Amino acid sequence: MTGSIDCLIIGGGPAGLTAAIYAARFRLDVLVVDEGRSRAALIPCTRNHAGFPGGISGQDLVARMREQAVEYGVRILADRVTKLSVGRKTFSATAGAHQVKARAVLLATGVTNRRPEMSEDLHRRALAAGRLRYCPVCDGFEVIDQAVAVIGTGERGAKEALFLRAYTPAVTLVAPNGRPALTPAQISDLDAAGIARRDGPVSSFRLAAAGLTFACAGEDLTFDAVYPAMGSDPHSDLAASVGAEIARDGCVKVDAHQRTSRRGLYAAGDVVLGLDQISHAMGQAGVAATAIRNDLAAESPMRR
Protein backbone atom coordinates (compact mmCIF):
# COMPACT_ATOMS: atom_id res chain seq x y z
CA MET A 1 0.00 0.00 0.00
CA THR A 2 1.67 3.18 -1.22
CA GLY A 3 0.01 6.52 -1.77
CA SER A 4 -1.23 9.78 -0.33
CA ILE A 5 -4.27 10.04 1.93
CA ASP A 6 -6.03 12.65 4.04
CA CYS A 7 -5.64 11.05 7.45
CA LEU A 8 -3.41 8.33 8.84
CA ILE A 9 -4.49 6.93 12.20
CA ILE A 10 -1.87 4.94 14.09
CA GLY A 11 -3.53 2.56 16.54
CA GLY A 12 -6.74 0.58 16.22
CA GLY A 13 -8.16 0.64 19.73
CA PRO A 14 -11.30 2.55 20.81
CA ALA A 15 -9.68 5.96 20.26
CA GLY A 16 -8.26 5.17 16.83
CA LEU A 17 -11.38 3.47 15.54
CA THR A 18 -13.73 6.15 16.85
CA ALA A 19 -11.62 8.80 15.12
CA ALA A 20 -11.63 6.70 11.95
CA ILE A 21 -15.43 6.45 11.95
CA TYR A 22 -15.79 10.20 12.45
CA ALA A 23 -13.15 11.09 9.87
CA ALA A 24 -14.60 8.74 7.24
CA ARG A 25 -18.07 10.20 7.79
CA PHE A 26 -16.45 13.62 7.27
CA ARG A 27 -15.60 12.19 3.83
CA LEU A 28 -11.87 11.99 4.44
CA ASP A 29 -9.69 9.24 3.00
CA VAL A 30 -8.63 7.32 6.12
CA LEU A 31 -6.14 4.55 6.80
CA VAL A 32 -5.74 2.90 10.20
CA VAL A 33 -2.48 1.07 10.87
CA ASP A 34 -2.87 -1.27 13.83
CA GLU A 35 -0.43 -3.84 15.15
CA GLY A 36 -3.16 -5.54 17.22
CA ARG A 37 -1.97 -4.77 20.76
CA SER A 38 -4.78 -2.59 22.07
CA ARG A 39 -5.19 -2.80 25.85
CA ALA A 40 -8.94 -2.78 25.30
CA ALA A 41 -8.72 -6.22 23.68
CA LEU A 42 -7.39 -7.62 26.98
CA ILE A 43 -10.56 -6.68 28.89
CA PRO A 44 -12.58 -9.85 29.64
CA CYS A 45 -15.77 -7.86 30.19
CA THR A 46 -16.34 -4.14 30.61
CA ARG A 47 -19.52 -3.26 32.46
CA ASN A 48 -19.23 0.51 32.62
CA HIS A 49 -19.42 1.14 28.88
CA ALA A 50 -22.78 2.77 28.26
CA GLY A 51 -25.14 0.86 26.00
CA PHE A 52 -24.15 -2.67 27.05
CA PRO A 53 -26.16 -3.46 30.22
CA GLY A 54 -24.74 -6.98 30.50
CA GLY A 55 -21.22 -5.90 29.67
CA ILE A 56 -19.11 -6.57 26.60
CA SER A 57 -15.65 -8.01 26.13
CA GLY A 58 -12.94 -5.72 24.89
CA GLN A 59 -12.37 -7.93 21.86
CA ASP A 60 -16.04 -7.82 20.89
CA LEU A 61 -16.19 -4.06 21.34
CA VAL A 62 -13.12 -3.48 19.16
CA ALA A 63 -14.45 -5.92 16.54
CA ARG A 64 -17.75 -4.03 16.35
CA MET A 65 -15.94 -0.73 15.98
CA ARG A 66 -13.70 -2.11 13.23
CA GLU A 67 -16.76 -3.37 11.36
CA GLN A 68 -18.40 0.04 11.63
CA ALA A 69 -15.25 1.83 10.44
CA VAL A 70 -14.91 -0.45 7.42
CA GLU A 71 -18.58 0.14 6.60
CA TYR A 72 -17.72 3.79 5.96
CA GLY A 73 -14.71 3.03 3.80
CA VAL A 74 -11.88 3.03 6.34
CA ARG A 75 -8.95 0.84 5.31
CA ILE A 76 -7.22 -1.06 8.11
CA LEU A 77 -3.66 -2.30 7.74
CA ALA A 78 -2.38 -4.89 10.22
CA ASP A 79 1.16 -3.65 10.73
CA ARG A 80 3.36 -1.44 12.89
CA VAL A 81 4.46 2.07 11.99
CA THR A 82 8.18 2.08 12.63
CA LYS A 83 9.03 5.49 11.24
CA LEU A 84 7.25 8.81 10.94
CA SER A 85 8.71 11.90 9.28
CA VAL A 86 7.32 15.26 8.31
CA GLY A 87 7.72 17.27 5.14
CA ARG A 88 6.49 20.70 4.14
CA LYS A 89 2.83 19.70 3.82
CA THR A 90 2.61 15.95 4.47
CA PHE A 91 3.77 13.24 6.83
CA SER A 92 5.47 10.08 5.62
CA ALA A 93 5.05 6.81 7.50
CA THR A 94 6.75 3.44 7.13
CA ALA A 95 4.79 0.35 8.13
CA GLY A 96 6.54 -2.84 7.11
CA ALA A 97 6.87 -2.74 3.32
CA HIS A 98 4.30 0.05 3.05
CA GLN A 99 5.00 3.75 2.58
CA VAL A 100 2.15 6.15 3.26
CA LYS A 101 1.89 9.93 2.90
CA ALA A 102 -0.81 11.72 4.82
CA ARG A 103 -1.93 15.32 5.24
CA ALA A 104 -2.73 14.65 8.90
CA VAL A 105 -1.78 11.98 11.42
CA LEU A 106 -3.60 10.94 14.58
CA LEU A 107 -1.64 9.00 17.18
CA ALA A 108 -3.84 6.61 19.16
CA THR A 109 -0.93 4.41 20.22
CA GLY A 110 -1.86 3.98 23.88
CA VAL A 111 0.34 2.74 26.69
CA THR A 112 1.69 -0.52 28.08
CA ASN A 113 1.00 -1.41 31.70
CA ARG A 114 3.99 -2.33 33.81
CA ARG A 115 3.27 -5.89 34.92
CA PRO A 116 4.32 -8.09 37.80
CA GLU A 117 6.72 -10.83 36.77
CA MET A 118 4.65 -13.71 35.42
CA SER A 119 4.37 -15.67 32.20
CA GLU A 120 2.22 -14.38 29.35
CA ASP A 121 -0.04 -17.42 29.71
CA LEU A 122 -0.59 -16.85 33.44
CA HIS A 123 -1.18 -13.15 32.84
CA ARG A 124 -3.84 -13.94 30.24
CA ARG A 125 -5.59 -16.53 32.44
CA ALA A 126 -5.52 -14.33 35.54
CA LEU A 127 -7.08 -11.45 33.59
CA ALA A 128 -9.77 -13.72 32.13
CA ALA A 129 -10.61 -15.05 35.60
CA GLY A 130 -10.93 -11.56 37.07
CA ARG A 131 -8.08 -12.24 39.50
CA LEU A 132 -5.71 -9.72 37.93
CA ARG A 133 -7.14 -6.27 37.29
CA TYR A 134 -5.57 -3.01 36.14
CA CYS A 135 -8.35 -0.44 36.41
CA PRO A 136 -10.19 0.22 39.67
CA VAL A 137 -12.15 3.00 37.96
CA CYS A 138 -13.44 0.39 35.48
CA ASP A 139 -14.08 -2.52 37.78
CA GLY A 140 -13.83 -1.57 41.45
CA PHE A 141 -17.55 -2.38 41.58
CA GLU A 142 -16.72 -6.00 40.75
CA VAL A 143 -14.52 -6.51 43.85
CA ILE A 144 -17.02 -5.37 46.47
CA ASP A 145 -16.15 -7.08 49.81
CA GLN A 146 -13.38 -9.15 48.25
CA ALA A 147 -9.83 -9.52 49.55
CA VAL A 148 -7.82 -7.16 47.33
CA ALA A 149 -4.09 -6.54 46.99
CA VAL A 150 -2.61 -3.45 45.40
CA ILE A 151 0.95 -4.03 44.24
CA GLY A 152 2.62 -0.65 44.26
CA THR A 153 4.31 2.00 46.30
CA GLY A 154 4.53 5.73 46.74
CA GLU A 155 1.72 8.08 45.77
CA ARG A 156 0.39 5.82 43.00
CA GLY A 157 0.08 2.76 45.21
CA ALA A 158 -1.38 4.66 48.15
CA LYS A 159 -4.00 6.42 46.01
CA GLU A 160 -5.12 3.19 44.35
CA ALA A 161 -5.41 1.39 47.69
CA LEU A 162 -7.45 4.25 49.17
CA PHE A 163 -9.67 4.33 46.06
CA LEU A 164 -10.43 0.61 46.37
CA ARG A 165 -11.15 0.96 50.09
CA ALA A 166 -14.52 2.42 49.01
CA TYR A 167 -15.45 -1.06 47.72
CA THR A 168 -14.03 -3.43 50.30
CA PRO A 169 -12.66 -3.34 53.85
CA ALA A 170 -9.99 -5.94 52.96
CA VAL A 171 -7.31 -3.99 51.06
CA THR A 172 -3.58 -4.67 51.35
CA LEU A 173 -0.88 -2.48 49.83
CA VAL A 174 2.07 -4.66 48.84
CA ALA A 175 5.44 -3.13 47.94
CA PRO A 176 6.77 -5.04 44.90
CA ASN A 177 10.47 -4.68 45.66
CA GLY A 178 10.80 -4.23 49.39
CA ARG A 179 9.85 -1.52 51.84
CA PRO A 180 7.46 0.97 50.19
CA ALA A 181 8.43 4.60 49.61
CA LEU A 182 5.59 6.20 51.55
CA THR A 183 5.48 9.58 53.22
CA PRO A 184 4.32 9.90 56.86
CA ALA A 185 1.10 11.51 55.58
CA GLN A 186 0.44 8.58 53.21
CA ILE A 187 1.08 6.06 55.98
CA SER A 188 -1.30 7.97 58.25
CA ASP A 189 -4.02 7.95 55.55
CA LEU A 190 -3.56 4.23 54.91
CA ASP A 191 -3.64 3.38 58.59
CA ALA A 192 -6.75 5.52 59.15
CA ALA A 193 -8.49 3.62 56.34
CA GLY A 194 -7.53 0.25 57.82
CA ILE A 195 -5.40 -0.70 54.81
CA ALA A 196 -2.78 -3.33 55.61
CA ARG A 197 0.79 -2.91 54.35
CA ARG A 198 3.22 -5.64 53.38
CA ASP A 199 6.84 -5.33 52.29
CA GLY A 200 7.98 -7.34 49.26
CA PRO A 201 9.63 -8.51 47.18
CA VAL A 202 6.87 -10.38 45.39
CA SER A 203 7.38 -13.38 43.12
CA SER A 204 6.04 -16.79 42.06
CA PHE A 205 2.54 -15.86 40.96
CA ARG A 206 0.10 -18.71 40.45
CA LEU A 207 -3.60 -19.02 39.83
CA ALA A 208 -5.67 -21.18 42.19
CA ALA A 209 -9.34 -21.78 42.83
CA ALA A 210 -9.18 -19.44 45.83
CA GLY A 211 -7.64 -16.58 43.90
CA LEU A 212 -4.25 -15.29 42.78
CA THR A 213 -1.38 -16.39 44.99
CA PHE A 214 2.12 -14.94 45.14
CA ALA A 215 5.12 -15.11 47.43
CA CYS A 216 5.71 -11.95 49.44
CA ALA A 217 9.04 -11.86 51.28
CA GLY A 218 8.94 -15.66 51.42
CA GLU A 219 5.31 -15.98 52.58
CA ASP A 220 2.47 -17.06 50.31
CA LEU A 221 -0.43 -14.62 50.11
CA THR A 222 -3.72 -15.23 48.27
CA PHE A 223 -6.21 -12.57 47.20
CA ASP A 224 -9.49 -12.57 45.33
CA ALA A 225 -8.16 -9.79 43.11
CA VAL A 226 -4.76 -8.18 42.56
CA TYR A 227 -4.28 -4.69 41.14
CA PRO A 228 -0.79 -3.81 39.89
CA ALA A 229 -0.31 -0.07 40.49
CA MET A 230 3.11 0.08 38.89
CA GLY A 231 2.50 2.70 36.24
CA SER A 232 2.56 2.48 32.46
CA ASP A 233 4.76 3.41 29.52
CA PRO A 234 3.17 5.70 26.91
CA HIS A 235 3.88 4.88 23.26
CA SER A 236 4.95 8.42 22.38
CA ASP A 237 8.15 7.68 20.46
CA LEU A 238 6.64 8.52 17.06
CA ALA A 239 5.44 11.88 18.34
CA ALA A 240 8.87 12.62 19.76
CA SER A 241 10.53 11.62 16.49
CA VAL A 242 8.82 14.48 14.64
CA GLY A 243 9.45 17.02 17.38
CA ALA A 244 6.08 17.03 19.15
CA GLU A 245 6.20 18.11 22.77
CA ILE A 246 6.19 15.28 25.31
CA ALA A 247 5.23 15.69 28.97
CA ARG A 248 7.49 14.60 31.81
CA ASP A 249 5.42 11.44 32.30
CA GLY A 250 5.97 10.47 28.66
CA CYS A 251 2.47 11.35 27.42
CA VAL A 252 1.96 13.46 24.31
CA LYS A 253 0.98 17.06 25.05
CA VAL A 254 -2.13 18.30 23.23
CA ASP A 255 -4.41 21.33 23.24
CA ALA A 256 -8.16 21.37 23.78
CA HIS A 257 -8.70 20.05 20.24
CA GLN A 258 -6.14 17.21 20.55
CA ARG A 259 -3.58 19.05 18.43
CA THR A 260 0.05 18.39 19.33
CA SER A 261 2.75 21.05 19.07
CA ARG A 262 3.59 19.65 15.60
CA ARG A 263 1.23 21.07 12.98
CA GLY A 264 -0.90 18.33 11.41
CA LEU A 265 -0.21 15.83 14.20
CA TYR A 266 -2.95 14.95 16.69
CA ALA A 267 -3.20 12.48 19.58
CA ALA A 268 -6.02 10.85 21.51
CA GLY A 269 -6.57 8.10 24.05
CA ASP A 270 -4.25 6.81 26.74
CA VAL A 271 -1.11 8.20 25.04
CA VAL A 272 -2.48 11.60 26.13
CA LEU A 273 -2.58 12.52 29.81
CA GLY A 274 -6.08 12.00 31.17
CA LEU A 275 -8.54 9.47 32.53
CA ASP A 276 -7.59 6.08 31.07
CA GLN A 277 -11.12 5.07 30.15
CA ILE A 278 -12.64 3.85 26.89
CA SER A 279 -15.34 6.52 27.08
CA HIS A 280 -12.74 9.26 27.59
CA ALA A 281 -10.60 7.97 24.71
CA MET A 282 -13.62 7.92 22.41
CA GLY A 283 -14.54 11.47 23.39
CA GLN A 284 -11.02 12.69 22.65
CA ALA A 285 -11.13 10.87 19.33
CA GLY A 286 -14.32 12.61 18.27
CA VAL A 287 -12.76 15.97 19.12
CA ALA A 288 -9.55 15.09 17.28
CA ALA A 289 -11.32 13.90 14.13
CA THR A 290 -13.42 17.06 14.01
CA ALA A 291 -10.31 19.21 14.42
CA ILE A 292 -8.58 17.28 11.64
CA ARG A 293 -11.52 17.77 9.30
CA ASN A 294 -11.75 21.50 10.03
CA ASP A 295 -8.01 22.07 9.80
CA LEU A 296 -7.78 20.25 6.46
CA ALA A 297 -10.83 22.09 5.14
CA ALA A 298 -9.19 25.41 6.07
CA GLU A 299 -6.28 24.48 3.82
CA SER A 300 -8.40 23.11 0.99
CA PRO A 301 -12.18 23.75 1.09
CA MET A 302 -14.34 20.61 1.02
CA ARG A 303 -17.25 21.00 -1.38
CA ARG A 304 -19.46 18.41 -3.00
Image (cartoon, helix red, strand yellow):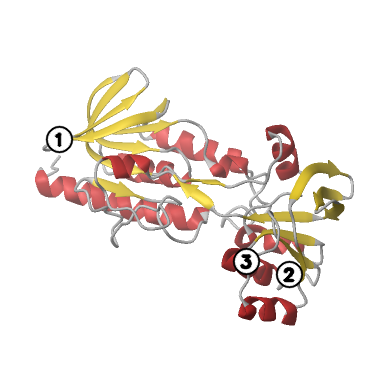
The answer to whether 15 is drawn above or below residue 36 in the figure is: below
The C terminus - image quarter: top left
| Quadrant location of the N terminus in the rendered image | top left
* Cα separation between marks 2 and 3: 25 Å
- Crowd around label 3: few <14 · some 14–19 · many ≥20 (10 Å): some
Residue beneath disc 3: 181
Callout 2 touching callout 1 (CB < 8 Å):
no
Q: Is residue 56 above or below residue 53?
A: above
Residue in the picture at 46% in, 58% down: 280
| Image position, residue 44 (x, y; %) | 67, 44
- Which residue: 70% across, 63% down? 179
Task: Residue 137: name its quadrant.
Answer: bottom right
**Residue underneath mark 2:** 167
Tell me residue 28's x, y (percent). 25, 38
| Label 3, label 1: how far apart the Cα atoms are | 46 Å
Is residue 18 toward the left or the right of residue 38 in the image?
left
Q: Name the element at disc 3.
A: loop
- Identify which residue, 126 or 2, lies in the foreground: 126
Is residue 130 something that shows in the picture? no
Query: Counting residues from the N terminus, which is met first, the one under dot 2 or under dot 3?
Result: 2
Q: Is residue 269 left or right of residue 86?
A: right
Q: Which residue is mark 1?
A: 87
Check disc 3 and give the amino acid type.
Ala
In the rendered structure, the answer to whether residue 68 lies left or right of residue 107 reads right
Q: Residues within 10 Å of mark 2 (few under 14, many from 20)?
A: some
Residue 110 image point, x, y percent: 46, 45
Q: Residue at 55% x, 54% y: name it.
A: 231
